[in-house]
Image: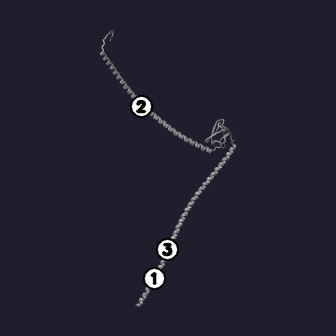
Amino acid sequence: MKHLVTVIVIALLATNVWFGRWIHSSGVENGRLRSQVRGSQAALTNSLTVIATKDQTVEVLSDKVSQLTRVLTNATAQLRAARETIRGYEAEAQENQRKSQEAQSFLVEVPPPEVSSEKDKYGREVKTMVFPKVLGRNGELLATNAPYGNQYGRRVSFRPASGPISVDVERLHPAILRYLAIDTEDAKRKQEQMDSAWRAKEAVDYRQFLADQQFREQRRQADEQLAIERAKAQAEIDKMQAEERVKLEAAQNERMKADAAARMADAAMIEALNPYPTTVIQNRNTSIRY
């Protein structure tokens, strides 16, 4: 029995020792597993942070690429516009050079004007330009020995012996315009300004005309109404005067009747107070009594 108890106690002690060791090894293993889990969680957090950072970096880079693309597109458009402008300037310079060369050749073909100067009555120096030939744009002869008059807008006048003429700047030969230092486009702009000013003046004059016409119409209507009122007043006055004349005539008739009655009464009273003898004179068919 004692041996059995001893065996049981030894078995229990061995079991406790083994269980303790197992618990200890399980705790160690759990700690190690917890450490591994925490490490895995930290690594996962770091990975997520790196991924988020990479995503943000990609977004930033995408924005920068988009901005650079827009800048490059704008720069390309500006470069294209600049090239077009440069080509336009080059074409304009070539055209101006061509016109200058044509003008130089025209100057050789068209004789220059004879310039003279004299003083007017105020002592001012007045220059006179006489063109031996005034040519049109296509070389047609417009006048000979024609003094230059003046420029009014896009019209240029000359005073040849045959009578004054006025020519549009686009009809004149470029050499004539060159001698006169007249720019065609500038003359056109001046004409447009003059036309615009003239149209504005016409509009103002027309509005003034309408205002004057309206004023005259209102004045006419007022005069007509005044004439009607005066006619009404005159008719009323005439009516009142006619009524007054009728009343006056009636009063005069009554007064005459009263005067006649008074005279008859006076005569009857006098005859009653002063009777006279009656003398009868017979003269055929007439008898007179005194």
Q: Is residue 145 visible?
A: no
Disc 2 marks which amino acid?
Ala
CA–CA distance in space, label 3 to label 1: 26 Å
State which tag comes first along the sequence, 3 or 1.
1
Which residue carries the number 1 mark? Answer: 20
Q: Is residue 262 visible?
A: yes
Q: Residue at x 61, y 45 (%)?
A: 186
- Up/down of 91 relative to 161, above or below: below
Residue 6 position in % (x across, y down): 42, 89
Asked if labels 2 and 1 touch by Cβ distance under 8 angstroms, the answer is no
Residue 72 or 262: which is nearer the viewer? 262
Residue 170's quadrant in the figure? top right
CA–CA distance in space, label 2 to label 3: 122 Å
Residue 49 or 69: which is nearer the viewer? 49
Disc 1 marks which amino acid?
Gly
In front of the other: label 1 or label 2?
2
Residue 238 position in % (x across, y down): 40, 28
Disc 3 marks which amino acid?
Arg
CA–CA distance in space, label 1 to label 2: 145 Å
Residue placed farthest to the front in the image?
A: 273
Which residue carries the number 3 mark? Answer: 38
Residue 246 position in % (x across, y down): 37, 25
Residue 229 position in % (x across, y down): 43, 33
Which residue carries the number 2 mark? Answer: 233
Relative to 93, 269 lies left or right: left
In front of the other: label 2 or label 3?
2
Q: Residue at x 53, y 40 (%)?
A: 204
**Number of residues whose C-alpha sits closer than 10 Å to that of mark 3, classed few (under 14), some (14–19) or many (20 or more):** few
Asked if labels 3 and 2 touch by Cβ distance under 8 angstroms, the answer is no
